[in-house]
Image (cartoon, rainbow, N blue to C red):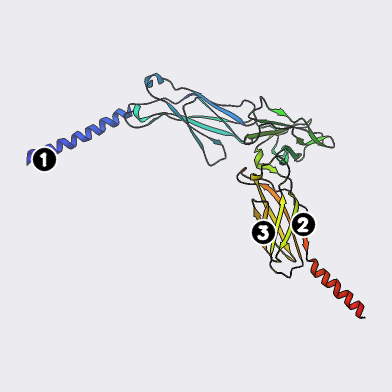
């Protein structure tokens, strides 16, 4: 029995030693963080390049596929974006009204490290646009609308307390342009730029569209403002037209309208209908350009409806409602005829 007890002790001691040896072996495997990590601004108004070089002494892991875990965010954001990549650079868009911070470390896969992933320490980088001018000098109430998915118009109001002769300039960029481009057609009020009419923007849909509005003044510096849009999310279509309202069997009402004119595909529309029956009004939506409803009462004297359109969730994350269409109405002419007959009968009787 004593020998058996001794064998068991030796067996457990062997397990402990083996586990400790494995931990020690893994602990000896180390890798350095990437070198020369930096955030580079190529002048695209918020589209930045995060780049780095391989870590030192990587030749010890020639048989390994080294990866990098990259985390980045605007400084006031609660959430980090995370990317795993084998490349030595990564590009993304940022809000340059705020600072940018990023960190990266090296990853060695388990098959190179005796079964457990090895990570380096983090390497960190930050980027700020040098602030100039006070916050009050920035433009106000920037509003951009992509009318009928055809032409873009942006407008703004001057900053608070800026001199009347302050000059604002707008620059824009999206993937496909060689460089940031200045607005070719400013909207002016009393000689001051307060908006921009953009030219045809070829192949700009479903891409980040970067805008910077900066300014100059003889009295004080003007702080620039940065914006990022996706144009399909700020489309304002034309309203539908050619509305028709038909009453069938005195009970069912058929509402129909034509699809708004322009390049927006039929599958991209959602419609909002406002229907009025005498003094009762209700609103509904549909993705079709026709709807059938039941009348509340066969005694109703007038039915009216109007409709507006918006790009739906299948083609954008959001959109802007069009203006309302002209109203289309139906009146119960038989009731008018009866009223007219009754009036004439009364006159004849008198």
Q: Which residue is mark 3?
A: 292
- Image quadrant holding the C terminus, namely bottom right
Q: Quadrant of residue 185?
A: top right
Compared to 153, does 114 lie above or below? Answer: above
* Residue at point 78%, 66% (across, down): 332
Label 3: state its secondary structure: strand
- Frontmost residue, 254 versus 210: 254
Q: Which residue is mark 2?
A: 328
N-term mark: 2 or 3: 3
Q: Which residue is mark 1?
A: 5
Q: Is residue 37 visible?
A: no
Question: Which residue: 35% across, 30% down?
Answer: 110
Is 348 left, or right, of 67 in this rendering?
right
- How far apart marks 2 and 3 lie (CA) works out to 15 Å
Q: Is residue 346 visible?
A: yes
**Of all residues shown, which one is farthest toward the bottom?**
350
Above or below, 156 against 115 in this view is below
**Image check: 184 left or right of 47?**
right
**Lower position in the chain sequence, tag 1 or tag 3:** 1
């Amino acid at each position: 029995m004593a020998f058996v007890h001794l064998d068991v002790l030796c067996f457990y001691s062997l397990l402990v030693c083996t586990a400790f040896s494995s931990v020690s072996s893994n602990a000896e495997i180390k890798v350095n963080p990437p070198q020369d990590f930096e955030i580079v601004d190529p002048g695209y108004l918020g589209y930045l390049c995060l780049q780095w070089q391989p870590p030192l002494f990587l030749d010890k892991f020639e048989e390994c596929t080294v990866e990098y875990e990259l985390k980045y965010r605007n400084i006031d954001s609660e959430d980090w974006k995370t990317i795993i990549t084998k490349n030595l650079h990564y590009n993304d868009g940022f809000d340059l009204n705020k600072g940018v911070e990023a960190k990266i470390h090296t990853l060695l896969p388990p098959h190179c490290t005796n079964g457990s992933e090895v990570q380096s320490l983090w390497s960190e980088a930050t980027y700020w646009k040098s602030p100039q001018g006070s916050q009050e000098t920035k433009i106000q109430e920037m509003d951009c609308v992509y009318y009928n998915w055809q032409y873009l118009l942006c407008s703004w109001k001057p900053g608070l307390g800026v001199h009347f002769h302050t000059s604002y300039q707008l620059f824009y960029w999206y993937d496909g342009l060689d460089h940031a481009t200045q607005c070719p057609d400013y909207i002016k009020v009393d000689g001051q730029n307060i908006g921009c009419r953009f030219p045809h923007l070829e192949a700009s849909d479903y891409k980040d569209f970067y805008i910077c509005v900066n300014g100059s003044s003889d009295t004080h510096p003007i702080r620039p403002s940065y914006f990022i849009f996706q144009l399909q999310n700020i489309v304002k279509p034309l309203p539908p037209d050619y509305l028709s309202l038909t009453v069938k069997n005195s009970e069912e009402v058929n509402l129909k309208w034509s699809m708004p004119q322009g390049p927006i595909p039929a599958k991209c529309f959602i419609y909002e209908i406002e229907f009025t029956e005498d003094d009762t009004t209700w609103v509904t939506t549909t993705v079709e350009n026709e709807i059938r409803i039941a009348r509340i009462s066969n005694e109703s004297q007038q039915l009216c409806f109007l409709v507006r359109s918006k790009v739906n969730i299948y083609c954008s994350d959001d959109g802007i409602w069009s203006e309302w269409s002209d109203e289309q109405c139906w009146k119960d002419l038989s009731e008018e005829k009866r009223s007219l007959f009754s009036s004439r009968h009364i006159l004849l009787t008198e």
